Each structure stands twice: as structure tokens, then as C-alpha cells.
Amino acid sequence: MNPERVRHRALPGALCVLVGVLLGTLGASLPAFVPWSPPVWGTLLLALGGVAAVAGVFDVFLSPGTAVPHAVAAALHDARAADVEARVDTDAVRRVYRPDGRLSLVAPDTALDGASGDDAAVTLEPVGAALIEHVPGIDGADDRAALVARLADAATGRFELADDVTPLAVTEARVRVAVADCLVGDPAAVDHPVASLFGVALAADADAPVAVDLSQADGTAVLTVRQV
């Protein structure tokens, strides 16, 4: 399992164990530091600490492998991709995420100026616009490399969209990331959650439209996000 995902899953249980240890320590040492305290106070703290520690251990070791089965998210994504493909030839359009949070599917020869997207064959509400609201620290990223790293961690840990998302190259004009073992649908589909997350965030960061392209290299999907 991805280390970021393991940390995200284990955090509540680990905190519960820590609280249990602290309560148990306080209960055991209470008579020495507060001699006038009733004995029941120490006993109560010890009991609460034991319950918290045991609950934390159970949470860490007995939590399910995934919070929501990947098949659920994959089915939702596949249904939406099929709907879009029925409306437009997705192989003949560019996928452009705009700084206003919209996804435009435009003809390859269309000039893009960051306007409202009236030149698009189809304009969609990207799934990345909803996902990005749950990624902490986006606005506080020091630079583009830090932003890309946080997006990669969110894609693999918080959202469990792929087993591994590795930044390959990060510049002001272009970002390339490798997506290995995608867990939700076909990464080449329109508005795939990984591509959407990066497209929405990087378009907002650059305050300019970005095009998202996908290629395959040694069985790994390579996502390229570039300003247009």
C-alpha cells in the first residue's frame, strides 16, 4: 500500500493510542503529584486510557484496506466518460482546463486566450474542482514544485486514485508526472480524476488555461500539463 495512504489511514488510530498512553500515565502518577485527589480519579483515568489505547490499536490494524471500494469510483467515472464520448469525439479534441475552474474540449486548431470557453465543443464541470477543495495547503504552496508534490500526495493518499504518482519534470510552463497502477478507470479517459486534479490546480496557479495530454511509457501513464 502507498506510504502516504498508510499514514493517512493510521493517523486517527495512532492519535487514539497516544491519548490512551497519556491518560494512563496521568492516572498512574496522579496520587504522587496530587496526593489529596480521590483514588477513583486515578482509576478512572487508567480505565479511560486503556480503552483509548485498545481502540486505537484496533483502528490501526483492523481498518479495511480501502475506505470506499475502488469499483464505486471507477463506475461513476466510466459512466461520465461514456456520456461525454457520446456527445463529442474525445479523440479529436484537446482537453483544456481554464482558470475559472471549467474544462473545455476544443478542436486542435482552436486559439486559446483564457476566455470563457465559448470556442469549446463541450464545456464541463471538472471533477478536479470538487477534489481540490479537500487538498490542504494548496493556497500556501511555496512554489510550483511544492504544489505538484502536494497534488501527488493527495492523488495517492487522500483520494486513492493511483498507487503511485511521481513528478518527472516541473517548470512554470510544463509539468510531467508518471501515474502508475491507476485505481479508478482509464487514465486516458476525459477528465480522469488524476488529470482533472492536476489540470484544475495548475490552471488556477498559473491563472491561464492548461492543456492536459497523456502518453504511455513502459506501461506507465505519463501526464503532461502545459500552458497554452
Image (cartoon, rainbow, N blue to C red):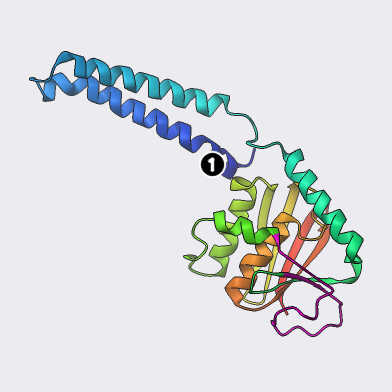
Q: Taking the image as drawn, is residue 183 in sight?
A: no
Residue at the spot x=86%, y=78% of the render? 108
Kindly identify which residue carries mark 1: 8
Which residue sits at x=49%, y=59%? Answer: 137
Q: Where residue 179 sits: x, y (%)?
A: 73, 54
Residue 11 placement (x, y as % from top left): 48, 38
Residues 32 and 37: in front is: 37
Residue 26 visible, this angle: yes
Image point (23%, 21%), residue name = 27
Image location of residue 36, percent across then percent down = 7, 20
Q: Tell me the quarter of the picture where residue 160 sits.
A: top right
* Furthest residue toward left: 36
Few, some or many C-alpha atoms within 10 Å of disc 1 (few <14, some 14-19, many ≥20)?
few
The quarter of the rendered structure image containing the C terminus is bottom right
Quadrant where the image shows the N terminus: top right
**Quick check: 194 left or right of 35?**
right
Q: Quadrant of residue 170?
A: bottom right
Q: Does 58 sit left or right of 128 as displayed?
A: left
Q: In x, y percent, where is residue 150?
A: 56, 57
**What count of labels does the image hold?**
1
Amino acid on which the number 1 mark rests in the picture? His
Which one is in front, 40 or 34? 40
Callout 1: SS: helix
Confirm whether the magenta stretch covers residue 117.
yes
Is 46 contained in the magenta span?
no
Kindly indicate the quadrant of the structure image that contains residue 30.
Answer: top left
- Relative vertical location of residue 50 with respect to residue 176 in this rendering, above or below: above
In terms of secondary structure, what is the magenta stretch mainly?
loop
Residue at the spot 69% in from the left edge and 69% down from the top edge: 102
Up/down of 26 relative to 140, above or below: above
Looking at the rendering, the stretch of residues picked out in magenta corresponds to 103-126
